[in-house]
Amino acid sequence: MRARCAIPARAAAGASAASSTASAPSSELGERAPASATITNGTAVLRAAAGSVLYLALIALLSLGMSTAVRDSAVAVGIVLGLLYLFPIIANVVSDEQWHRHLEQIGPMTAGLAIQATTDLSSLRISPWAGLGVLAAWAGGALLAGGLVLRLRDA
């Protein structure tokens, strides 16, 4: 019984000791990162959080445009899920590295999810904001198509 009570006490003592230190959190075991790395990582986390909200809003707009264009909810769900998941599947099947890269850059899901990256941004296929721009272009195209079809069909 005493050992169970000691573990939370040690964890609380460790948490208060860690919060009282003035240096930045450790990047690896035993090392402390410079304070500038924490600020940069903080902006990346803020970008990822705000970008995730924008990503979901753009997916909703893409779905709205497709559902307006086809006027059938089951077909619209199938088309949107096909657009989102078909690009990564085809990109994994393609053996040519250049085509693989282009499919990941133009796919709405893979490009849009680049906004959530917080580390090692140089290894991404597309930059975070450009990826969100690709998803915005897909959503804008779907809304434009949905608006045109609605206008022509229901005029």
Image (spheres, rainbow, N blue to C red):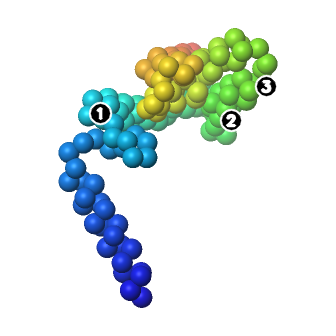
- Ranked by sequence position, the earlier of labels 1 and 3 is 1
Q: Quadrant of the N terminus?
A: bottom left
Query: What residue lies at 28% left-to-right and 66% top-to-bottom?
Result: 13
- CB atoms at circles 1 and 3 under 8 Å apart? no
Q: Is residue 55 visible?
A: no
Q: Reply above or below: 74 against 54.
A: below
Q: Residue at x 33, y 41 (%)?
A: 32
Three-letter code, disc 2: Gly
- At 68% across and 28% down in the image, what residue appears? 88
Q: Position of residue 87 (x, y in %)?
A: 68, 25
Return the residue nearer the eye: 79 or 43.
43
127 relative to 99 in the view: left or right = left
Residue labelled with disc 3: 93
Q: Amino acid at mark 1?
A: Pro
- Nearer to us: label 1 or label 2: 1
Q: Which residue is mark 2?
A: 78
Most foreground residue, 24 or 50: 24
Q: Which mark is residue 154?
A: none
Camera-nearest residue between 63 and 45: 45
- Nearer mark to the viewer, of 3 and 2: 3
- In this rendering, is residue 141 above or below 83? above
Return the disc, 1 or 2, that comes first in the chain's sequence.
1
